[in-house]
Image (spheres, rainbow, N blue to C red):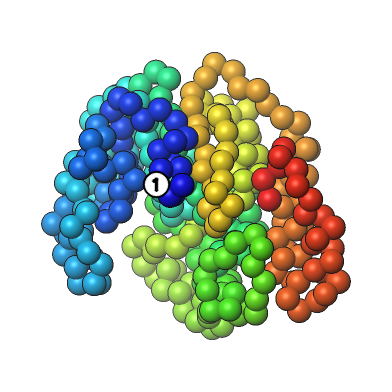
Amino acid sequence: MTRQKFLQSLFNSDGLGLEIGPSHCPVFPKRDGFNIETVDYAPTEDLRRKYSEMGIPSDHIENVDYVTNGKSLADTIPHRNRYDYIFSSHNIEHLTDIVDFFISCELLLSPGGKVVLAIPDKRFMFDGMRHPSTSGEILEAHYHSANRHSLRAIFDYNTNILFMDGQNTWNRDSRGTLAFEKDPSAAKAQFDLASQTTEYLDIHGWCFTPASFRLIMQDLNDLGLTHLGLDHIASMENWEFYAVLSAQEKFTTSNRLDLAKDVLREEVISGLQLLAEDDPVMGLALQALRRPDPARLW
């Protein structure tokens, strides 16, 4: 099954949808009959010009219905309780205020609506050496109504961009030689640039694994910062995972310590994978720990 078909199978896409930042590869294209509106950071013609100049075919870029111009979704789109689903692919890691994004989604969703997110899994990509983001960091960004990424995040992102055998993504069975893209001085240059401007600098401000995202969603729900709870998480066993959220009166919660242990377990196993190429003992430990278990995603 293709990625597009898999994503379309995760929920009922009947009704009116909103796709965030589909750019040149929409997952729910209007041309295929989906009743969908799109929101992006630039108008249609600007996007077509940009991708044409990059040598990327732009004929799949569909008409943009709403342009954010740096505003939140709720401030960009004048409607309320309008959409039966909101889909966003590889967007949440770039946001500066994730809580504000969830608040916007709640305002825009119709009763019973879904938010579906495709999220990079930091274990199997260039964020592999970074630690998963925490609820506290997300809470702090919301407290400050952040419209830019923190200087810490800008340095950590740039100094830890990782490649495995020259590739910036891999899968759970990959082994290879690791190398950083930049040295600390190059990362510090980006840090200095960010400290001297009020402009938004685009990075992966946040890093997630399935377990860390599950823990964050439960924390935000328990704190009353969002009424969106996690329906389920799915994966195609590659470098991203998919989260389906909805608003309900009460969600079934898990023991927080068990969730935190799952985050640690994912970190241990992904760390062993990164070390296995150079250390046979780590490879053996990885084989021992990575047993089939349908109750877990790792």
Q: Secondary structure at mark 1?
A: helix
At a point 77% along the width and 54% down the height, the residue shown is 290
Numbered circles on residues, count? 1
Q: Is residue 145 above or below residue 23?
A: above
Give the image location of residue 26, x and y in percent: 30, 48
Asked whether, in this view, residue 260 is left or right of residue 24, the answer is right
Extreme front residue here?
1
* Residue 259 picture quarter: top right
Mark 1 residue type: Gln
User: Which of the 4 image quadrants contains residue 145?
Assistant: top left
For the point 80% across and 68% down, the residue is: 283
Q: Position of residue 91 (x, y in %)?
A: 41, 50
Confirm whether residue 148 shows in the render. yes
Q: Out of 196 and 28, give the one closest to the viewer.
A: 28
Q: Is residue 86 above or below residue 88?
A: above
- Residue 3 lies, with reference to residue 257, above or below; the image says below
Q: Mark 1 = which residue? A: 4
Residue depicted at x 79% and y 62%: 286
Mark 1: give few (<14), some (14-19) or many (20+) Cα within 10 Å: few
Asked whether, in this view, residue 220 is left or right of residue 86, the answer is right
Q: Position of residue 83 (x, y in %)?
A: 32, 27
Q: Is residue 42 visible?
A: no
Decide if residue 271 is on the left or right side of residue 123. Answer: right
Q: Residue at x 55, y 57 (%)?
A: 239
Residue 249 placement (x, y as % from top left): 54, 16
